[in-house]
Amino acid sequence: MRQTEKIANEMRKDIIEMIHAANSGHPGGSLSCVDIIASLFFEVMDIDIDSINSTDRDRFILSKGHASETLYAALAEMGIIPHEELLTFRKFGTRLQGHPNMNHCPGIDMSSGSLGQGLSVGVGMAIANKMNNKPYRVYVLVGDGECQEGMIWEAAMSASHYGLDNLVLIVDHNGLQSDGFVRDVMNNSPLGKKFDSFGWNVFGCDGHDISIITQALKMAKTVKDKPTVLIAETVKGKGVSFMENNPNWHGRGISDEDYIRAMKELGGDDCE
């Protein structure tokens, strides 16, 4: 776990580096899901550099595709893409677009960006797994604001109907979306009770405690005949004090001054 915590901090620094170099990106929601994605890729999922092209490995769908920075940082930490390529983020001709493109970059299982679609694709993958007796599990990460989309609930109903115990949904519950606080834009609480009423197994956890996230995701593997949702309580902009719980950092570039401040907080070297 301690090694994964170190990796998560490196991922946060990578995110700041990428957005600063591009002067564009989504720092808040990318930083909030770092510990979730680190737990999945380095503790839970059956995936590594040797299995990246295997049809039998676990699948991960980043439905909140604007947080692509976090996924790219994880792929770089795994050695699936070159670490130096991260600085091409959002540059002309790069594989690392603002939203993930499965046709350009290895390790991306769905091209995403239009919110609300990832869970439906995950349901399709999980059904295909059942039909083909494949061993892989499907993990989908969505935002809490994204759960305002009706498509999420159609997919939730389908997943329960088909007893997809090989499907896990993680909600990055940071309380913010592009236009402000979720509770003010369209209050969808309590999400746990809603998923429970749709026939899902529901876990809740601290979305920044890698040991607890990992434990919950491993427990999900023991659940039979129903899908699992993990409501992960997070802080938008986690790890950088002036970005934390601040709606202004949903989508924007990072100035030289803010870059230095952020990297100092994260323990970055040679940031001046």
Image: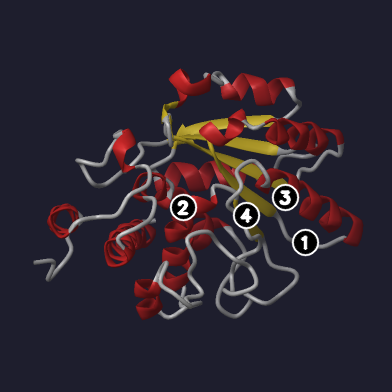
Farthest residue to the left: give it.
272
Cα distance, mark 4 to mark 2?
Answer: 12 Å
Upstream in sequence: badge 2 or badge 1: 2
Residue 144 seen in render: no
Q: Residues within 10 Å of mark 3 (few under 14, many from 20)?
A: many
Q: Nearer the viewer, mark 2 or mark 1?
A: 2
* Residue holding disc 1: 135
- What colour scheme was applied to this rendering of the protein? secondary structure
Look at mark 2 in the image and give the residue it sits on. 67
Q: Amino acid at mark 3?
A: Gly
- Picture coordinates of residue 50 (x, y %)? 60, 80
Check disc 3 and report the residue beneath it. 122
Q: Amino acid at mark 1?
A: Pro
What amino acid is labelled 4 in the image? Ile
Q: Quadrant of residue 23?
A: bottom left
Q: Residue at x 78, y 39 (%)?
A: 224
